[in-house]
Image (tube, rainbow, N blue to C red):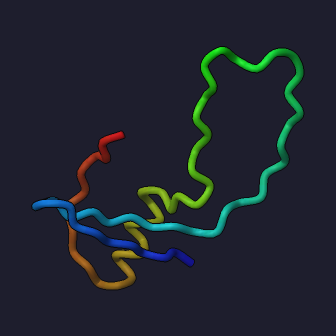
């Protein structure tokens, strides 16, 4: 299941999707924490393939562009 969200800021249209978080085993890290913490990926991200499949299922035509991070 993917929940689709949409929004508009100025003249830009944004579309994103969320899916249930996958349960993964968290390894215990030992030692000092890093000086610069590493950002964890968003656990509910549907991903490009999930979004493409959801839009295809809705019969929405689109052109794929690389996402800007």
Could you say where residue 35 lies in the image, as x and y percent from the top left?
Answer: 65, 14
Q: Quadrant of residue 7?
A: bottom left
Q: In which quarter of the image is the N terminus?
A: bottom right
Residue 23: x, y in percent? 77, 58
> Horizontally, is 64 left or right of 11 in the view?
right
Q: Residue at x 63, y 25 (%)?
A: 37
Q: Position of residue 67 (x, y in %)?
A: 31, 47
Position of residue 28 in the picture relative to residue 49 (left or right): right
15 relative to 47, above or below:
below
Depth order, front residue of 27/51: 27
Instruction: From the viewer's side, name the closer residue of 39 and 25.
Output: 39
Residue pushed farthest left? 11
Instruction: Tell me if 46 is positioned left or right of 40 in this view.
Output: left
The relative height of residue 67 versus residue 56 in the rendered view (above or below) is above
Point out the image quarter for the C terminus.
top left
Which residue shows up at 58% across the image and 35% down it? Answer: 39
Residue 68 place in picture, x, y as percent = 30, 42
């Amino acid at each position: 299941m993917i929940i689709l969200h949409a929004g508009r800021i100025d003249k830009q249209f944004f579309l994103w999707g969320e899916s249930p978080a996958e349960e993964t085993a968290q390894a215990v890290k030992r030692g000092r924490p890093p000086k610069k913490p590493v950002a964890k990926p968003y656990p509910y991200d549907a991903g490009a393939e999930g979004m493409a499949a959801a839009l295809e299922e809705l019969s929405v035509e689109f052109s794929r562009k690389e996402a800007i991070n």
